[in-house]
Image (tube, rainbow, N blue to C red):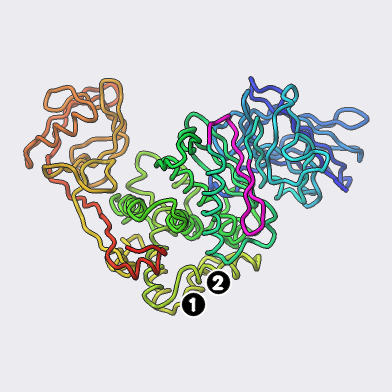
Amino acid sequence: MTKVRYQIALIDPVAHLVRVRLDFTPASADPVELSLPAWIPGSYMVRDYAKHLQPLSASDAKGSLRVQQLDKQRWQLAHRGLPVQVEYLVYAFDLSVRGNYLDDQLAALNPCALCLAVTDQTECLLELEITAPGLCDWQVATGLRRDAETGFLGQGFYHADHYQQLIDSPLLLGRLQCQQFDVAGVPHYIVLAGEPTADLPRLCTDLTDVCQRQLEVFGGLPADLTEYWFLSWVTDKGYGGLEHMNSTLLLLSHQDLPHPLRPTESTDAYRTFLGLCSHEYFHTWWVKRAKPAQFFPYQLHAEQYTAQLWLYEGFTSYFDDLALIRSKKIDLPQYLRLLEQNINKVQLVPAEAVQSVADSSFNAWTKYYKQDENAPNAVTSYYLKGSLIALCLQARLQASGLSLEALMRRAWQAFGVSGKGSQEQGFIELTKDYAGTAIAAELDAWVHQAEPLPLKQCLPLLGLVACFRARQHSKDWSGPGTLSYPPRDWGAVTAAATDAVLVQQVFVGSAAHQAGLMAQDLIIAANHKKVNETTLLQVLADAEPGSLLSLHLFRRQRLLELKFPVLLAKESLMMLHAENAELMHSWLGVTA
């Protein structure tokens, strides 16, 4: 019998308000504690969802009940032993996949940020009634079980076995486009909200191929997966995704979707969206079921630390693009360009010599998810460098007649199927058992030391050769060079501003650092001539190496002149070329 019931009503799309009514019967005579998570699994930052709750009240058949707030996300309720009804409003205007959003076109809701837990009844059956008063044509897509009377995509009643399942099941509402495709006999659904124009049959075909490649890594779908939902929120500008047990909530723009009038067109934007789907689907095994042992169970009231995000997010980032080339959604040159970008974004920032991926994982709460202007000098991406660790491990294993996929299947059995998760050194120990002490020791060093990876040695083992060229500007990450002159060192990330160039970040040790440039400086002139982003770099390119360039800028309200040393660029971009067809085929399943 259902003991806890939630009524979710989208009462005011203009004011972005959702009304929540919570009904339950106290399990004992003791006061009841109600709480809301402070963060959502998969996104390692405290978000304090309770700040969006508007005044909370409670009552029973005899009248109102006293509710006392204990801290930022907990309330204590005194009761008379009778069935209790709690009511509150939630402000929903978070344009992300991690919170709640409601307007006159759609709603994207995360129960983690919406539904209070009855602390001593989190393991009982839960019922969720979803309504959109005045919007009877709105549909509901979610991975929660639905009543037969509710019907497919209907407003009505949905069910969860416990609170953890409820808060791991996002909801997408609106006038939805939906199409089913099957993977290994399990129904999958692609759902679009936001009234986009899209080629749904092509999406289904492409996603079927991508999902199949991910399934092959682990040898099959999880035994408990009975359906899967790609919940896609389409807007004017947005990007992001968050994994869940049998669904993912995705944020994308209209330009990311394939157009039905251009059935053979393959754009970078669509490739990026398929890569996002690939990434989140891989998490169905690798994060949602196999995960750090510290997350069994999740404790969502405060930070929960692990040094293993390089393994779970980084390896997922390796396999997401790999699935695209293996399913022929991108070709070899496109894949190599993506790989170049990842390599250069890791190796050309000072942070690689400052922070290991293990340290980056552990400090994700305060560093990776809260990056500031100093991030390139201090924060290593456990996504990008973790994916390169997977690449290097693949190379070492392949050279020994082994494979990363075989290791991943062992890890899936040990950490996922077992339900035990992985200890901090668990994957490294598993690598030792599979591939020997030498490879495991290398992996341990790659993870725990703030040093460059041995890519020059590993890439040839996969059939690749690397060459180098000078970096031309701060947004230059891959591909052939086009400049006819030696590029100058710059060392700052900039953005266009009104009649100025805004300095956003300065790399330690660069020419910009030596000149004294700081984040938030507004450069207005170079050599006494007004500049924008393009002309500033051109003036620098025309300056004689060894000379000093005069920069005029505003720092807060002060007008300053700095002398910028004109130096030849020292940074070298790595470019990749296929060389050995046999090794490439063993790795990617394609021929060089």
Task: Report the residue at 30% width, 52% height from top.
Answer: 344
The label on residue 410 is 2
| Span of residues in magenta | 179-198
Q: Is residue 590 left or right of residue 431?
A: left
**Within-10-Å neighbours for mark 1: few <14, some 14–19, many 20+:** some
**Within-10-Å neighbours for mark 2: few <14, some 14–19, many 20+:** some
Comes first in the chain, label 2 or label 1: 2
- In this rendering, does residue 361 appear at all? no
Q: Is residue 115 left or right of residue 85?
A: left
Task: Report the residue at 48% width, 73% height from top.
Answer: 431
Asked whether residue 196 is drawn in magenta, I would say yes
Give how far across and how far down residue 439 sits, in percent: 40, 74
Element at badge 1?
helix
Badge 1 is on which residue? Answer: 434
Q: Is residue 68 above or below residue 586?
A: above
Q: Is residue 324 left or right of residue 220?
A: left
Give the camera-side residue of 557 and 4: 4
Question: What amino acid is found at the position of numbered circle 1 in the picture?
Answer: Tyr
Q: Is residue 395 left or right of residue 198?
A: left
Q: CA distance from mark 2 to mark 1?
A: 9 Å
Q: Say which quarter of the image contains residue 549.
A: top left
Element at badge 2?
helix
Task: Report the residue at 65% width, 30% height from top.
Answer: 175
Q: Main secondary structure of the magenta part?
A: strand
